């Protein structure tokens, strides 16, 4: 792979992950099963994280995966399964051969791009952006974390209390359902 191929490579992947994000978001809002909808939302979150990484926002991409795809979706699925809103047969909401064929083509395209990257004598310094030295006080994360724990500490703590109350409410609703 030569340096002339890089803009085409990034453009193709950008549109591919954009199409995956839009398709998964449409499938998310059209599902009847909350468990299946949550799984499509996870796919949307991963595609958005890939787009962030391609736009040189690696920290935002990692936070997308850790916070939204990891923590929030686990809590959401926990509440959905605790309330028993989904049936086991509803999880597999796409049946037939066409979705599997499309997924196979997307997977084949991504694997072929990875193989082309691994076999090329490409100088990786051209692909990876130049990293500046972190500030002497606190590193790279300190400018992001400092306002969250100083100016916005009240909002941060209220959000955590809101999530805790939502989980407790789901437990109470589930207990009332069993008591009847």
Image (cartoon, helix red, strand yellow):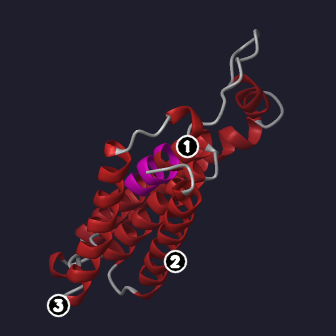
Which circle's residue, 1 or 3, is located before the other in the chain?
1
> For the residues marked 2 and 3, what is the alpha-carbon distance in whole angstroms?
21 Å
Residue 172 x/y as whole percent: 39, 59
Is residue 161 found left or right of 123 in the rendered image? Answer: right
Question: Going 58% across and 38% down the picture, which residue do you hit?
Answer: 126
Q: Which mark is residue 96?
A: 3
Residue 4 x/y as whole percent: 57, 55
Which circle's residue, 2 or 3, is located before the other in the chain?
2
Is residue 140 found left or right of 82 in the rendered image? Answer: right
User: Mark 1, residues whose alpha carbon is within 10 Å: few (<14), some, or many (≥20)?
Assistant: few
Q: Which residues are magenta?
A: 66-74
Quadrant assignment, res 43: bottom left
Q: Which mark is residue 44?
A: none
Residue 117 x/y as whole percent: 38, 47
* Circle 2 residue: 22
**Dominant secondary structure of the magenta stretch?**
helix
Instruction: Say if residue 93 shows up in the picture.
Output: no
* Vertical relation: 62 (above or below) 134: below
Judge by depth and name the residue closer to the eye, 100 or 123: 123
* Vertical relation: 135 (above or below) 45: above
């Amino acid at each position: 792979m030569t340096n002339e191929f890089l803009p085409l490579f990034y453009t193709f992947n950008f549109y591919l992950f954009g199409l995956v994000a839009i398709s998964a978001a449409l499938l998310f809002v059209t599902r009847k099963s909350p468990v299946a909808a949550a799984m499509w939302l996870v796919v949307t979150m991963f595609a958005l994280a890939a787009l962030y990484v391609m736009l040189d926002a690696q920290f935002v991409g990692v936070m997308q995966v850790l916070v939204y795809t990891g923590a929030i979706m686990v809590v959401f699925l926990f509440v959905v399964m605790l309330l028993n809103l989904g049936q086991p047969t509803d999880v597999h909401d796409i049946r037939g051969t066409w979705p599997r064929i499309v997924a196979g083509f997307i997977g084949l395209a991504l694997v072929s791009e990875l193989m082309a990257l691994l076999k090329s004598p490409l100088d990786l310094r051209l692909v990876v952006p130049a990293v500046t030295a972190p500030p002497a006080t606190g590193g790279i994360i300190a400018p992001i974390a400092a306002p969250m724990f100083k100016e916005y500490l009240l909002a941060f703590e209220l959000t955590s209390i809101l999530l805790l109350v939502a989980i407790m409410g789901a437990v109470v609703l589930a207990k009332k359902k069993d008591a009847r």
